[in-house]
Image (cartoon, rainbow, N blue to C red):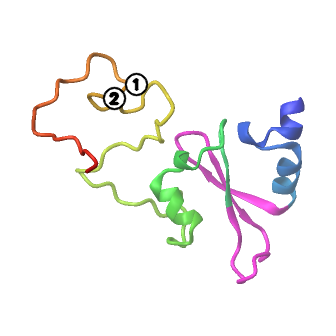
Amino acid sequence: MLDKIFAWWNGATIGTLFTVAKRGALVGTDAFGNRYYQSRDNVSYDGRKRRWVIYNGYAEASKVPPEWHGWLHYTFDEPPTVNPLPRRSWEADYKPNQTGTPMAWRPQGSLAAEGRRPAATGDYQAWKPE
């Protein structure tokens, strides 16, 4: 219960949920369970309806897929639930940022990677002060 009162990074707090219920209208959800809202009235300074996301779990901006990112930033007028982006054959499936997780990319020679660092090839000369 305390995490719903104070811990905004693990989901919405009680105050946020109350504000969303009062002022927001659910527009849609994505494959990760994030919920996207738009204000019922024009409350922003430029007359547009505000748009926001309530993350499913840990609040990490890279968990927002590209099509929803475009809608949040007013690149698209219609949300992906109404007008989905066409899927190209060369597009890879979306994955959130893996930095700091066991799935993070670790290049060969990295201290965090498994295995041994490759031997120097001899094409490097260390700088020596004169």
Label 2 CA crowd tier, 10 Å (few <14, some 14–19, many 20+): few
* Residue lying furthest front: 130
- Where is residue 51, by image quadrant? bottom right
Q: Residue 129, position in %: x, y?
A: 28, 48
The numbered dot on residue 91 is none
Is 27 covered by the magenta stretch? yes
User: What is the magenta range?
Assistant: 23-51
Who's the residue at 47% across and 58% down the image? 67
Mark 2 element type: loop
Cα–Cα span, label 1 and label 2? 5 Å
- Where is residue 63, by image quadrant? top right
Q: Is residue 124 above or below residue 86?
A: above
Q: Residue 74, position in %: x, y?
A: 56, 72
- Residue 47 appears in the rendering: yes
- Does residue 64 appear left or right of residue 14 in this picture? left
Depth check: give the residue in front, 13 or 26. 13
- Which residue is label 1 attached to? 112
- Which residue is label 2 attached to? 110
Who's the residue at 36% across and 33% down the image? 105
